[in-house]
Amino acid sequence: MNLANSPFLAACRGEKPERTPIWIMRQAGRYLPEYRKLREKVDFLTLTKTPELAAEATMQPIRRFGMDAAILFSDIMTPLEGMGIELEFAPGPIISRPIRRAEDVEKLHVADPEESIPFVMEAIRIVRREIPETPLIGFAGAPWTLFCYLVQGSGSKNFARARAFLMSEERAASSLLDILARTVASSLEAQARAGAQALMIFDSWAGLLDEGSYRRFCLPALSLLRSRLQKSGLPLIYFPYGGAHFLAAVAELGFDVVGLDWRSSLSRARAVLGPKPALQGNLDPAALFAPRKELIRRAKALLDEARDAGPHIFNLGHGIERDTEIAAVEALVETVHSYGTAGGHS
Ligand code: 1CP
């Protein structure tokens, strides 16, 4: 098959593919026995920094389930070491010296990906060679989501310190978001040059902001990203987790694909976003723990709703949970592939 005609890339371009494509956020990970086996031998950072192993983890879910897109095995925090940040994983990211003052921001610089993360581009080249028939998604964290970890210092339920930094150090906060946007743009451009076919921006903590703060702090950084990446010619996917309350602002950014979490309604999102972007999502990851019949009923209901809501890429509404059963994922992929055809019910 010509890669450009793959259902995933067709949907990204806003066309109606012959069948609905599916991939799953965090599809490479601990619910897979073959991933756990890889992880027995090396820690997470080593895995992301060893191109052969990162490529292997990327391809595992493709081989097992025949997903319609691969996503590079890496992490949103990976490009930050090149900015002068010290980073560990336990298992989530830990920043040894969080950014707490305006002076801390002045010490940071925009990272050059070819210098600081060449292993990412090498992993992309290996995946391209090994599974040329499957489109590969390169990705990065959104500036605000990376800001959350850098200021808070680790994961958190509500990132109160990061939100407070926006209020107390407005100029330093904008400056940090700008450095992050430039670092992320360079990383995604390098991933595009190495052979990625689509680029995704994970804004996992966007939903913590009210619309005013989102517009004031996130829109400038995201429009910088969007205008730089438009030149790559690749489809851009933006996933504002928990962001249903500011989708009108997201609409102004003009991304090719918008990811939705499971609380959003596909048809309501379509009404706000207009006809252009493809919608990606948004089955509740918990549905994979429901009785098989209920899982399939929900997947079909989502496909039915999507049929009237324009181009659609099937996905979960957030990352797959680590104790998800393999058989449930198989049933989901099978359902989407057989039921999600352009022609309708089968
Ligand atoms: O122990 C392990 O094996 C490490 C666990 C792990 C994994 C498998 C981490 C640490 N990152 C990853 C891979 C990863 N992270 C991918 C790989 C590709 C795939 O989807 O298959 C991707 C896309 C990410 C992106 C990522 N990392 C996000 C955005 C997506 C989301 O879930 O919202 C975020 C927020 C992170 C930070 C992070 N890295 C790792 C963890 C456990 C976390 C979350 C920390 C927290 O709860 O705040």
Image: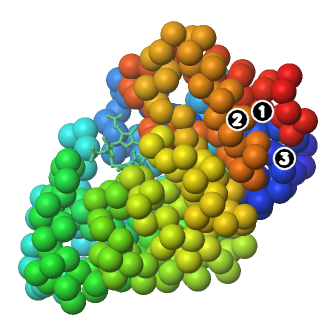
Query: What is the quadrant of residue 95 in the picture?
Result: bottom left
- Ranked by sequence position, the earlier of labels 1 and 3 is 3
x, y (%) of residue 195? Answer: 68, 60
Decide: is 194 above or below 231.
above
Residue placed farthest to the bottom in the image?
A: 171
Is the N terminus in the top left, top right, bottom left or bottom right quadrant?
A: top right
Residue type at mark 3? Pro
* Separation of residues labelled 2 and 3 (CA atoms): 13 Å
Image position of 234 with respect to 282: above or below: below
> Label 3: few (<14), some or many (≥20) within 10 Å?
many
Residue 303's tag is 2
For mark 2, does the 10 Å Cα neighbourhood hold few (<14), some (14 to 19), or many (20 or more) residues? many
Side of 114 where 211 appears, left or right = left
* Picture disc at residue 340: 1
Taking depth in this image into account, of 104 and 159 the one nearest to the observer is 159
Look at the image and tell me in which quarter the C terminus lies: top right
Q: Position of residue 158 (x, y in %)?
A: 19, 53
Q: Does 277 sit left or right of 298 as displayed?
A: right
According to the picture, the residue beneath numbered tag 3 turns out to be 17
Q: Is residue 93 left or right of residue 268?
A: left
The percent coordinates of residue 25 (x first, y second) are: 51, 41
